[in-house]
Every structure is written in C-alpha cells, then in structure tokens.
C-alpha cells in the first residue's frame, strides 16, 4: 500500500475509532435502578453496545446478573459474544423474518418493565431495518416492498424514515409507549444528518415531528409503487406516531454518545498531522452521490492548479437514484464519479466509505465499505479500457472497483456514524 493509501486508511480508521462502543459507551451509562436493567438495542452497533453495557454493569458496577437482561438486534455478521443480553442478527437494508420476530420480542420485553426498572435503549444506524413491526393490516411482505421502493427512489434517509415510522408499531416513539412505566434512557450513535433524535433508528423512544400527511406526500413525490393496504394504513389516524407532550415520554431521556461530527473531527486531526491544509465540507452532506462527487472533484482540481496540499473531507449520507442493474452503494458511486472527473490529474488520491463497513451491498458481512482511488486506479482503468461513465450509467461501481482492485473491505466495524469521504491533493 503506498503512502497516500496508508494515510487514507488511517483517516478512515480514526473516524471509526472515535465512535466505537467499546471506548465511548461506559461514560454515558446511568446508575443501576432499584429493579432490573433491561437493555434493548438495535442497529449495526447493537451487539457491541450491549456487550459494553454488560461489562459496565456486571464487571465494573457489580450488578447481580439476574437483574440484567435484554435483547440486541443487529445486522447479519455484526454479532459479538454476550453473557446476559440475547443477540439476534437480522436483515439490513431490507428487513427479514428475524427482524420481525426480534421486534415483537423487543416490544413484549419493554411491556414487562415496571416503575422500578431501567429500560436502557441503545441505538445505532441500521435500527430502522432491524426492528420491523408492521402496523395492523400491512403484511411483512408489503413492508419489505415499501422499503425496497424507498431505497431505490433516491429519497434521503429522513424521508425514508418518515414513511417507515407511520407503518410501524415500534418506531416513532412507540417503543417508549410500550415501556412507559419504566425509566427510559436512550443512548444513540448518530448516523443521520443534523443528528435528529427522531431520525436515528426512526426514533423509537422520542416524539416524532412528522405526520401521516408527510408520509403520504413522500409516497406521491417519488411516485412509489405501493400496495393498497399500505395506502390505507397511511390514511388511518390510528397509525399516527407519538407527538411531543405525550405522557409516554414523562420518564424518558435521550442522549447522543457519538456523532458524525465527532468522527469527522478525528479524521481531520489525522490529515492535519500529515501536513495537509483542510477543507472541511461538513458532516451532514446530502445529495446525489455522483453530483456531489463532481462538485468535490472541481474543488480538488482547483486546489491542484493553485499548488495547494489540501485534504478535502466530508461526512453525511449521499443517495443513489438506481437506474441500472449493477451493484454498489453511494460511497462507491461517489468514488466512481471522482474517477471519471479526476482522470489524468496527478497527485490525487481519495477514499469514500461507510463507517459501518458496508456500502450498499446485499447485506453480507463481506460487502465492501467503499472504495479508494489514486494513480494506480487510473492506470488500471486505462489498461483495461474501463469507462467510468458506462459503469455509472448502470450503477455498477462495485464491478468497476473490483476490476481495478480498489474496493475497501473492512468487515463490520460495529459502529455507524455515516460516511467519511477524503480527497488528498498533493503538490507534484
């Protein structure tokens, strides 16, 4: 691995480490209550968060093991060993039967909580897909179909979650309603722009400012093909989410323990120490991946002409409007667009990856986290006659970077604070 690639990987690793449950969770955990500690976790970091909570309460606080129980639902391949908290692996980004069962068990466990218990809810990105509990008269298959349509539409994650919250018995504050007799403490690793509590894992324990009317408008805006049962559900006032002022939240609190900004700051520190001037584009970027990449490529090319040694860094969550039949998530598509627009420019290297270790893909633990590129990429591209524009047209970034041997494979990182994108511009 050349020096630029080593630095890019160090920047990415620093971003992940800044949000890992092993190092950040314990400081935020509340004291044990008079009764039980009931841990309910969801998302790609759920198992790691559950294990960290176990170490704190059992080993550090000396809690009687019989007073600690719970259920953590995480993506397939993201489990870690636990002692008292059961771990279930479930589908992501499209929910599966395991997530369906886990959500039912989670709601049932929350309903057992008494006034003496602590309901400790640990959330990370991916929780929306892991906890799947369709409203009455909407089948699991219909909910899966809506999720697929939303993911293909190019809608930002906030809009996707608005629809999902109004088709769920666990999202949009409803988990808090199930466990309303207990003290509820939610600790979350944010993977959403602007760190909105109602958007992280679709806000199962916080008030929801969005409405059924908002959900219907999103369906119409993207002309989603949905079943009549789903349309009826979005018209049914009984499916409105929990709103601010609801007594459900009288004993509920919510805290962020890691954010995309935290991870971006850690990444910037590594780039600064390597001698780069920093262009910080922010931790909450949204937009079409290929278009954002074009804009960032222009910044890089301008810096190159000006003779600057510059690191361009950004976070957030980009989207892909799927038009082709290929494979690849928004980070790979971003990198592919960079390959198109930076071709021929010397002194350029870039990385775009999801901090959870999986960018798009089929839900496998071996999915790529993203991709890297540098002069080696351009050489391979020309040697093999690869046309980035053609691969972009087919949304087939994975095949392109597989051919150039530039896919970034990290495996599950056990956290998720969205994406990290870095372009290094060196003087030549």
Image (cartoon, rainbow, N blue to C red):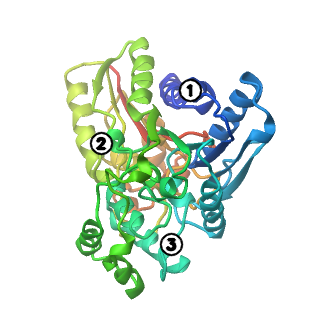
Residue named by callout 1 = 24
The answer to whether residue 308 is left or right of residue 349 is: left
Residue named by callout 2 = 285
Q: Earlier in the sequence, mark 2 or mark 1?
A: 1
* Residue at the farthest bottom position: 228
Q: Earlier in the sequence, mark 3 or mark 1?
A: 1
Tell me the SS state at disc 1: helix
Q: Nearer the viewer, residue 175 or 321?
A: 175
Instruction: Identify the mark at residue 134; answer none if there is no mark.
Output: 3
The answer to whether residue 359 is left or right of residue 225 is: right
- Looking at the image, is 225 positioned above or below residue 299? below
Tags 2 and 1 in contact by the CB under 8 Å rule?
A: no
Judge depth for marks 2 and 1 and give the one in front: 1
Q: Position of residue 398 (x, y in %)?
A: 50, 55
Q: Position of residue 293 (x, y in %)?
A: 30, 45
Which corner quadrant holds the N terminus? Answer: top right
Q: Position of residue 219 (x, y in %)?
A: 29, 73
Q: Nearer the viewer, residue 46 or 354?
A: 46
The answer to whether residue 71 is left or right of residue 268 is: right
Residue 343 in view in this figure: no
């Amino acid at each position: 691995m050349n020096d630029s690639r080593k630095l890019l990987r160090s920047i990415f690793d620093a971003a992940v480490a800044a949000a890992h449950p092993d190092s950040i969770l314990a400081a935020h955990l509340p004291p044990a209550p008079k009764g039980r500690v009931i841990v309910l976790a969801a998302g790609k970091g759920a198992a790691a968060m559950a294990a960290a909570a176990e170490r704190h309460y059992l080993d550090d606080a000396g809690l009687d093991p019989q007073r600690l129980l719970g259920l953590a639902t995480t993506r397939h391949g993201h489990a870690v060993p636990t002692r008292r908290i059961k771990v279930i692996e479930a589908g992501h980004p499209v929910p599966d039967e395991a997530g369906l069962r886990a959500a039912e068990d989670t709601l049932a466990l929350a309903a057992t909580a008494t006034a003496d218990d602590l309901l400790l809810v640990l959330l990370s990105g991916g929780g929306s897909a892991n906890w799947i509990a369709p409203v009455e008269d909407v089948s699991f298959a219909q909910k899966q179909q809506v999720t697929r349509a939303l993911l293909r539409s190019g809608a930002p994650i906030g809009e996707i979650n608005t629809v999902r919250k109004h088709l769920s018995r666990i999202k949009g504050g409803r988990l808090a309603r199930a466990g309303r007799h207990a003290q509820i403490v939610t600790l979350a690793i944010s993977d959403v722009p602007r760190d909105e509590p109602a958007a992280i894992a679709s806000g199962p324990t916080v008030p929801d400012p969005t409405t059924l009317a908002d959900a219907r408008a999103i369906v119409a805006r993207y002309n989603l093909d949905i079943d009549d049962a789903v349309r009826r559900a979005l018209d049914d006032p009984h499916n409105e989410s929990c709103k601010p002022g609801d007594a459900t939240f009288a004993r509920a609190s919510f805290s962020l323990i890691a954010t995309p900004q935290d991870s971006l700051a850690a990444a910037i520190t590594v780039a600064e120490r390597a001698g780069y001037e920093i262009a910080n584009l922010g931790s909450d970027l949204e937009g079409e991946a290929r278009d954002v990449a074009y804009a960032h490529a222009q910044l890089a090319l301008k810096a190159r002409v000006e003779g600057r040694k510059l690191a361009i860094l950004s976070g957030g969550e980009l989207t892909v409007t799927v038009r082709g039949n290929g494979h690849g998530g928004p980070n790979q598509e971003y990198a592919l667009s960079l390959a198109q627009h930076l071709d021929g420019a010397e002194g350029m290297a870039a990385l775009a990856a999801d901090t959870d270790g999986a960018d798009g893909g089929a839900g496998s633990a071996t999915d790529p986290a993203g991709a890297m590129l540098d002069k080696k990429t351009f050489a391979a591209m020309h040697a093999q006659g690869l046309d980035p524009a053609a691969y972009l047209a087919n949304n087939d970034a994975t095949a392109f970077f597989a051919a150039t041997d530039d896919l970034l494979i990290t495996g599950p990182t056990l956290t998720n604070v969205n994406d990290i994108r870095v372009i290094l511009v060196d003087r030549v």
